[in-house]
Amino acid sequence: MRIPKILAAMAVIVMAGAASAQEKPSFVFTAIPDEDETRLVERFTKVAEYLQAKLGVPVEYVPVKSYPAAVTAFVNGQVELAWFGGFTGVQARASTPGAEAIAQGAEDDHFKSYFIANAATGLKPSAAFPKDIAGKTFTFGARASTSGRVMPDHYIREAFGRSPEEVFARVGFSGDHSRTIRLVQSGAYEVGAIDYAVWDLDRKSGKIDETKVYQWTIRGDVDATFGAGFKDKVRETLLAIDDKAVLAAFGRSRFIPSSNDAYAPIGDVAKASGMLN
C-alpha cells in the first residue's frame, strides 16, 4: 500500500527491510463503492489476484468510502487504476493529465438506468418514461453516480421540464445502488433510480422481492513507475479476462476496449445539469 507522505520519514526506518526484499512496487487500484461492502470485497479480491498473476507485479485493491474518495485517490496518485462509473471517470480524467479509459464491460456499451418503484405505488413496468412517478418520494443513488444520478436527473428534466426537487415530494440520495433497492423495497422511498447491472445481480441472487456504465481508468504515469509498455499490458490483461468467476462478480460477459471520447456525452450532460464545472 502506498504510504501517506506525512508518515514517510517514519516509514523509511520501519519498512527498510521489506523494501529491499520487494524490488517491484505494488500496482494499486480502487473502485467506486456502488454496492455493499461484502460484494465489493468479493469482486475486487478476485480482480487483484488475477491481475497479479498476469502482470508480474504485486497488486493491491484499496477500498474507499465514497465516490468522491475514489476520484481523489486517483487524482492524488494514491492508486494507478480505478473502476469508475461514467461520471466519476470523467471527473477523474479531467483532473489527471494523461489518464485514459482503457476497458469497459461489453454490457456497458448499452447504457441503461432503471427506475424502480415499490409495488404499493401501483406503477407498472414499462419501456416508456414513467411520468406517473411525479409527486412521489424519490431516491437517487450516490450523488456522483452516472446510472444512479447523472443520467436519471437528465431523463427527469427532459420528461418534465423541471428539476427533480420540483417534480417529487421528497428527493434523497441512498449512497449506492444496493441501498436504493432496499429503500424502495422497504417503502422508505416510493421510487428510485439504479444501475441495471446491480438490479440484475440482486434479482439473480434472490435479494429482490418483485411482488450501470462503468469503465477501468488508468493514470498516464504508470509506465514511468512500472516500466515502458505497462499501460498497454494492463489494458491487454483486462480485455483478455475470461475467468468466469471474475466476470460474474461484475455481471459482465467480458471487457471490451474503451476510450475517453466514449464518455464525452456524459460530461456534456453533467455540465448542462450543473454537476460538472
Image (cartoon, grey):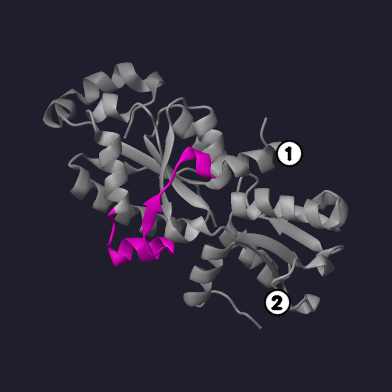
Q: Which mark is residue 125?
A: 2
Three-letter code, disc 1: Ala
Three-letter code, disc 2: Pro
Secondary structure beneath dot 1 equals helix
Q: How many marks?
A: 2
Q: Nearer the viewer, mark 1 or mark 2?
A: 1
Q: Is residue 253 left or right of residue 182?
A: left
Question: Percent position (x, y) of residue 78?
Answer: 40, 31
Magenta-drawn segment? 240-262
Q: Farthest residue toward the left?
A: 21
C-alpha gap between disc 1 and disc 2: 29 Å
Q: Residue sitting at 30 percent across and 66 percent down?
A: 244
Is residue 192 among what the camera can see?
yes
Q: Does the magenta portion include 43?
A: no
Neighbour tally class for label 2: few under 14, some 14-19, many 20 plus, Cα within 10 Å? few
Neighbour tally class for label 1: few under 14, some 14-19, many 20 plus, Cα within 10 Å? few
Q: Does the magenta portion include 245?
A: yes
Q: Residue sitting at 25 percent across and 19 percent down?
A: 12
Frontmost residue, 20 versus 28: 28
Q: Looking at the image, is mark 1 or mark 2 earlier in the sequence?
A: 2
Q: Is residue 125 left or right of residue 240?
A: right
Q: Which mark is residue 147?
A: none
Residue 133: quarter of image: bottom right
Residue 251: quarter of image: bottom left
Residue indicated by mark 1: 272
